[in-house]
C-alpha cells in the first residue's frame, strides 16, 4: 500500500510537469481571455509579467511545485479565485455524473453479458453486439453532439446545457433531467468495451469444471447464473479499476460538450487560456483519484476472490 501510494504521488507530479511543458509551448494565453485589448503585444507582456509567466520554464514550475508541496495550489489566473475553492464547487457535479454513469454501465454490462450468453449466436446477441460496437466507434464528443442535435434541437425534449435550469438548482427532477444526455453518452461510448470484458469473463466462468458439475447435479439455472456472476465479478472489477483514467477523461470531454458545470468544463477552459494553477491542480487531483479507484478496485477484487488474499499472504 505504501509503495503504491508513493508511486501514485510520483506519477501525479510527473503528470503536472509534463502538462506544464506542453501548455508552455502551446499557443494562446491568459491575456487572450481579456477581449479586444489582448491584441496589443504590450498588454500581453504586461499581463505575463504580473503573473510571473515571463520567467524561465523550470523556474515557473519550481515556484508552483514549492507552493503545492505546502498545500497551496494557487489562485486562478482567469477568475482570481482560490483553486481549491473552484475544485470543491464543481467536484460534486462531476462525482454525480461519473458515479451515475459508472453504476448504470456496470449493471448493464453484466446484464447484457448474461443475456448474450443465454441467447448465444441468436438475433438478440448479434443486435446487442452490433449496436454496442457502433456506438463505441463514435468518439464521446461526436456522440454527445449527435444527442444535442437530436434531443435538444430537433425534438427539443431534453436540456443540453448546464446542471439545472436557472432558479431550479435545488430541484431534484430538474437536475436529473439535465443528467440524462451526459450519462447516456458516457454509457453508450463505453458499453462495447466493458460489455466485451464482462462477456469474456462470464463465458470463461461457464466453462469451469465446478460450473459443469452444478449443471450435472440439476441445480436451478437461476442459482448457477448468480454463482457465475459472483465468480466473474473479481476480474471484471479489477479491469474496471484499470480503466478509471479513460473513463474519467471521457467524463471531462462530455462535460465540456454539454457545458456541464463540473471539473471537465473547468479543465478545458483553463487549458485554452493557459490557467496554469487550475490545470496543474486538476491534473494532479485526477491522477491521484485514478490511483485511488484502481487501489479500491483491487481491494474489492480480493474481497470477492479469496484466492487472491491467500496469494498475498503467501
Image (cartoon, grey):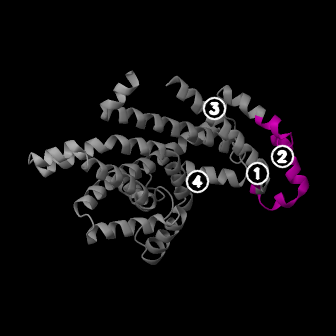
Residue stretch rendered in magenta on the structure: 33-61
Residue shown at 49%/66% (left/top)? 137
Residue 83 placement, left or right of 4:
right
Task: Check residue 52 for magenta coloring.
Answer: yes
Marks 2 and 3, how far apart at CA: 29 Å
Contact (CB < 8 A) between labels 1 and 2?
Answer: yes
Residue 90 placement, left or right of 303:
right
To which residue does mark 1 refer? Answer: 30
x%, y% of residue 194?
A: 40, 54
Is label 2 or label 3 in front? 3
Is label 1 or label 3 in front? 3
Provide the secondary structure element on which disc 2 rests.
Answer: helix
To which residue does mark 3 refer? Answer: 10
Closer to the chain start, of discs 1 and 4, is 1
x%, y% of residue 279?
A: 66, 45
Residue shown at 32%/70% (left/top)? 127
Closer to the chain start, of discs 1 and 3, is 3
x%, y% of residue 134?
A: 44, 69
Amino acid at each position: 500500500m505504501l509503495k503504491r501510494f508513493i508511486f501514485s504521488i510520483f506519477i501525479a507530479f510527473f503528470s503536472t510537469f509534463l502538462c506544464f511543458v506542453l501548455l508552455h509551448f502551446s499557443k494562446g494565453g491568459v491575456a487572450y481571455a481579456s477581449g479586444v485589448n489582448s491584441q496589443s503585444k504590450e498588454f500581453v507582456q504586461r499581463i505575463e509579467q504580473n503573473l510571473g509567466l515571463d520567467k524561465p520554464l523550470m523556474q515557473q514550475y519550481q515556484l508552483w511545485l514549492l507552493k503545492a508541496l505546502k498545500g497551496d495550489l494557487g489562485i486562478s489566473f482567469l477568475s482570481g479565485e482560490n483553486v481549491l475553492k473552484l475544485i470543491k464547487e464543481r467536484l460534486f457535479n462531476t462525482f454525480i455524473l461519473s458515479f451515475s454513469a459508472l453504476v448504470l454501465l456496470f449493471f448493464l454490462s453484466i446484464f447484457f453479458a448474461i443475456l448474450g450468453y443465454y441467447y448465444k449466436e441468436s438475433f438478440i446477441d448479434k443486435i446487442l453486439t452490433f449496436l454496442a460496437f457502433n456506438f463505441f466507434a463514435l468518439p464521446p464528443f461526436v456522440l454527445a453532439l449527435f444527442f444535442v442535435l437530436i434531443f435538444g434541437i430537433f425534438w427539443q425534449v431534453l436540456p443540453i446545457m448546464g446542471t439545472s435550469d436557472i432558479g431550479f438548482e435545488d430541484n431534484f427532477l430538474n437536475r436529473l433531467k439535465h443528467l440524462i444526455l451526459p450519462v447516456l453518452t458516457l454509457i453508450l461510448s463505453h458499453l462495447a468495451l466493458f460489455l466485451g470484458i464482462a462477456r469474456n469473463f462470464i463465458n470463461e466462468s461457464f466453462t469451469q469444471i465446478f460450473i459443469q458439475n452444478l449443471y450435472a447435479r440439476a441445480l436451478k439455472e437461476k442459482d448457477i447464473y448468480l454463482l457465475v456472476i459472483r465468480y466473474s465479478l473479481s476480474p471484471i472489477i479489477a479491469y474496471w479499476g484499470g480503466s478509471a483514467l479513460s473513463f474519467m477523461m471521457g467524463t471531462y470531454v462530455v462535460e465540456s460538450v454539454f457545458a456541464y458545470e463540473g471539473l471537465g468544463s473547468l479543465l478545458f477552459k483553463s487549458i485554452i487560456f493557459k490557467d496554469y494553477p487550475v490545470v496543474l491542480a486538476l491534473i494532479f487531483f485526477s491522477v491521484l483519484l485514478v490511483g485511488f479507484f484502481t487501489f479500491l478496485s483491487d481491494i474489492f477484487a480480493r474481497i470477492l476472490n479469496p484466492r487472491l488474499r491467500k496469494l498475498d499472504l503467501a
